[in-house]
Amino acid sequence: MVAAGVVGSTGYTGVELIRILTEHPEVELGFAVSKTHAGKTLENVVPGGTAVQLVNYEAALLDRIDVLFLCLPHGRSAPLVEQAYSREVRVIDLSADFRLQHADLYPQWYGHEHTHLGLLGEAVYGLPEVFRPKLKAARLVANPGCYPTSVLLALYPLFRSGLACSRVIIDAKSGVSGAGRTPTATTHFVEVSNNLKPYQVGAVHRHVPEMEQFLREWRGEPVSVVFSPHLLPTSRGLLSTIYVSQDEGWDDSDVEQAYSECYRAEPFINLLGTDEMASLAHVNHTNSCAIGWTRAGETLVITSAIDNLIKGASGQAVQNMNVIFGFDETTGLRI
Amino acid sequence: MVAAGVVGSTGYTGVELIRILTEHPEVELGFAVSKTHAGKTLENVVPGGTAVQLVNYEAALLDRIDVLFLCLPHGRSAPLVEQAYSREVRVIDLSADFRLQHADLYPQWYGHEHTHLGLLGEAVYGLPEVFRPKLKAARLVANPGCYPTSVLLALYPLFRSGLACSRVIIDAKSGVSGAGRTPTATTHFVEVSNNLKPYQVGAVHRHVPEMEQFLREWRGEPVSVVFSPHLLPTSRGLLSTIYVSQDEGWDDSDVEQAYSECYRAEPFINLLGTDEMASLAHVNHTNSCAIGWTRAGETLVITSAIDNLIKGASGQAVQNMNVIFGFDETTGLRI
Amino acid sequence: MVAAGVVGSTGYTGVELIRILTEHPEVELGFAVSKTHAGKTLENVVPGGTAVQLVNYEAALLDRIDVLFLCLPHGRSAPLVEQAYSREVRVIDLSADFRLQHADLYPQWYGHEHTHLGLLGEAVYGLPEVFRPKLKAARLVANPGCYPTSVLLALYPLFRSGLACSRVIIDAKSGVSGAGRTPTATTHFVEVSNNLKPYQVGAVHRHVPEMEQFLREWRGEPVSVVFSPHLLPTSRGLLSTIYVSQDEGWDDSDVEQAYSECYRAEPFINLLGTDEMASLAHVNHTNSCAIGWTRAGETLVITSAIDNLIKGASGQAVQNMNVIFGFDETTGLRI
Amino acid sequence: MVAAGVVGSTGYTGVELIRILTEHPEVELGFAVSKTHAGKTLENVVPGGTAVQLVNYEAALLDRIDVLFLCLPHGRSAPLVEQAYSREVRVIDLSADFRLQHADLYPQWYGHEHTHLGLLGEAVYGLPEVFRPKLKAARLVANPGCYPTSVLLALYPLFRSGLACSRVIIDAKSGVSGAGRTPTATTHFVEVSNNLKPYQVGAVHRHVPEMEQFLREWRGEPVSVVFSPHLLPTSRGLLSTIYVSQDEGWDDSDVEQAYSECYRAEPFINLLGTDEMASLAHVNHTNSCAIGWTRAGETLVITSAIDNLIKGASGQAVQNMNVIFGFDETTGLRI
């Protein structure tokens, strides 16, 4: 049994994470921290939530846990990562604090210097289908953003096989839980319902550098990303429709082979194949990523769908934990 | 042409009202006040809003308008009512400030003394199908609440004809725009979507005394109301399913006759008849109230549907204006 | 390990059932029958479905399974029940074919004579919280309807304690999956979205006699039910708002005690308590029933919520299987 | 007053069209044909529909009308167009039968030879913002498809000004009413709700040749279109997110000028400007097209939103009628 702690328990990712951990046969929940709701149970705060006691961070006993999950806003996560890391607790950080590998990107994209540069080099990017070998020994996991998860899983086989070019257009659509629980004008039911709203279109969303750093690494040269996220009138689910221009001659069988080689044995990748398209219905409430594609002239159109709260956040965090602790990777997760 | 002013322009009722007034062939919009957004146009604040300039209340010239619409929270409306009333401007108040006829109900239900008792007696309750004669001469209209509109229109013919008893159960369901534009945990898309949530069940909602005062008047003795509102995962629309126990022997034809006598000539009442049920689809985006009913043993089940923003607020306000100024009552309103 | 077979695999209850059985640690899925889609896998037919091979009924080997689940329309289930029953396979029938105890109710409510009267007396109504002792030895389980599940669980403690009267009003609201997968005008997205639609209001829905037979049994005399179902713009979830008039003097503590006595130890009953109301968010995607209540004068208002596909169908079927085979009742089910 | 006839009255476009025509101050509705529902009123067939009598086509008196609107599936429209055309009735055809200018495209895209080649050359494509001069004298209008309306309005100013290249990627999302009223697995509420589903991705949708023919005309050489439609969980509304690569040096002011020159005076074009994005909320329930854009490197990203039933179908049909009969173009239409 692994003892796990959670900080940031009442946000959407926290609630989903605690549900998964509570049902996980190899995990015992050590504590669940909520600054705002300490003293209550989660089910008192969130209808349908688990009957777990919420405590202050001060009452969270780091020395009694093996792994710490942090579901906090960026900037607030890093200090807690350090405390746990220094006590030899494995850390899975769902914030953005360790996702970008180069420190100089943080001021530009997150508005502040990185406060824990020493740890930055320790972090392993938690996309198991790509970085599994490194993850097995990781002491600090930077759990990927939801959009990058869907996009990088869709593009990795192509870039790895040289079947991709230097320019990618990503038209992405996400459910509202991706925007967090804090009520804003943007998340008001009346504003979202019957609507579809593009936001931060171009190359201005914080997930752009997270995607570009790996695409560049895989290609060996910079890749430019055009990224258009849209807010969907759904609670959860994320679909990226990705347009890749052809670099050089390749055909359908090359693409199929590239995907098959990478993902044939991956339990959480649902390869739909050529001329089949992924939809939210393929993946919602599961930890799977469904991928389908078709060709239109010189353009390959790829659709990649995940549940933003599971494969895009808490499910992937638990998958990473499974990798680290040597459990069957699907334990406690729905395929 | 009538010159109209609006105060509280960017809430859901304000936006809907300005749209109706802008399209109304007999109305010229004198001013649209918004404390928060003065200086902008409405379409800059609300996607899809009208291209109307928003001004401060100080810039609103009461002496240039014939009628003032107030779309404000309770308590904030009464002082402006007085200013307009004293300048001989007709006032249609969409707040609750003048809906309850007895001053002593305000502290109990709204938490403060009524500040303008002198005007309370002047207010006419703006339900044209019931109070049209009085409304023609009204200088101050208390525009009804959304729930009371659907319930009172459904029950008036029965009570008027003596076909009702002293106890009414109302199971009501409303779209989220009824909760206003201010973002709260309750109106967050993720909380509302895929959900149905009862709230303020029993006899604790502020619309209970508003309904009871007229039921008592029509019956000649107190009527007890059990009222269970539910928050629907829709932007707009309100359905009341009403259960009336039988007082004395009556049959289907009595009920049909009661409704027919009252509403035969009413343009905005859509009488569906016996064994037909009203739904939101009958009324959304119109100023109509659809009413259908069926009998189950000793219980008459009545369904009454309105668009909460139109017949339940801004449309009815314009209908009241049409009555006051002698326009055809359907002018500018969708049936 | 228990070997289970499913007939009717591609309807909403079949898909949900197969998902639960596939994840159940004590169950091996023997076969999944689909008349229409035999030869395909479920995930080919239903995006997000399990990777289970679908077969014809002829290929379903009854002698290799311990329990058969039937997810068929009424009338089509009974003949298969007989085949399995005669081979000593336990049967959990999700259709209505064995829910009504009196044979003469079938022609009236389902339009045909009951074809297997000999089995009718063998069937145990599968509401474990009420009929657990009988279910342990059951060879044929009549799995309850979704509406009756929510209503009977809400009313059983009151009737059992003599805290209820002879007349009950049920205002119920259900998500669209309750109407089945076959596309109709009623289930078209455009007709359901932004709508709320009452249907079969009064005492004409087939779930009325199912509820009345147990209320009568518990009270010892007939109970009249007024039942108003409404179609909600949600995929799943069912809320019954129930109005019970007071028979004799009782107070809040009596009600609390009645619920507590019955359900204190029930893992799937979430007692919210006095003045708390159940919503779909409390129960969706779980096998729980959330119950809350409040008093309004002489009326007790009870809200009871379930996920219609889980506690209202497939989850409860698995709960019944757990009871029969002596597994912990929560095995494979989400609380 | 113009007398108008409608054939195909009970589909989503027919219902919307009849609502608009009924409220139009210059139109008298001569007849409303429905093969399936003749003898009923529209409000009996469609909750919320207009109280208009439905008749058989045989009872439709062509010589009493000035303009005929056809809301029929492709292939069924052309014969009726001919009958009306030969009687000098103006025809506005909402089907695809006269949208493609070259006869040889019909077998390829619609599966049958064009049956009325003589009329094909007479048809004017009904996009008033582009083809207004021709439309004024048109006797037969081919009312555009919904997707082409949003795309062509967005691209016309760019192509007209030489600010566009030979390859366009269109990621489009439409509400379900675009799929018509006939119930199918695709339009079932449970399949659409909580989902986003790409379909006919690449260059296989019938609206592709409709878009390409005008892009080619405007550019003077072929333009290749990659087109990815997605089914949104909304009843109505259509958003196209369009990616245009840069041909040659241009800057933001060129783009702004191009749009401004074309659309400055257009009542139904809502130019949001640089770095503002269109959403469904900008346009639903109106005849407007909202257009906003931003630059990302060498790519111009344009968002173009319409209400698919209004500007994408029935509203544009009435706009075309207004052009033909010389009414103010906004008459009877919401901006």
Image (spheres, coloured by chain):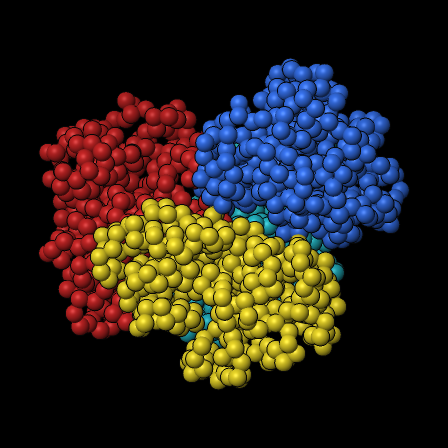
Chain colours: A blue, B red, C yellow, D cyan
Side of B89 where C155 appears, left or right:
right
Residue at far right of view: A249
Side of B167 where D47 appears, left or right:
right
Q: Is residue B212 visible?
A: yes
Expressed as whole percent of the image width and height from the top left, the position of residue B106 reads 18, 37
Expressed as whole percent of the image width and height from the top left, the position of residue C271 reads 42, 50
Side of C100 where C222 appears, left or right:
left
Q: Is residue D110 visible?
A: no
| Residue placed most toward the observer, A322 or A123 | A322
Q: Quadrant of the N terminus of chain A?
A: top right
Expressed as whole percent of the image width and height from the top left, the position of residue A262 reads 83, 43
Location of residue A13 with respect to C162 vertically, above or below:
above
Expressed as whole percent of the image width and height from the top left, the position of residue D197 reads 64, 51
| Residue placed most toward the observer, A104 or D238 | A104
Q: Residue at x 22, y 39 (%)?
A: B109
Location of residue C299 with respect to C111 vertically, above or below:
above
Q: Residue at x 78, y 33 (%)?
A: A136
Q: How many marks?
A: 0
The answer to which quarter of the image holds residue A215 is top right
| Residue placed most toward the observer, D113 or C146 | C146
| Residue placed most toward the observer, A90 or D36 | A90
The answer to which quarter of the image holds residue A104 is top right
Q: Residue at x 64, y 69 (%)?
A: C67
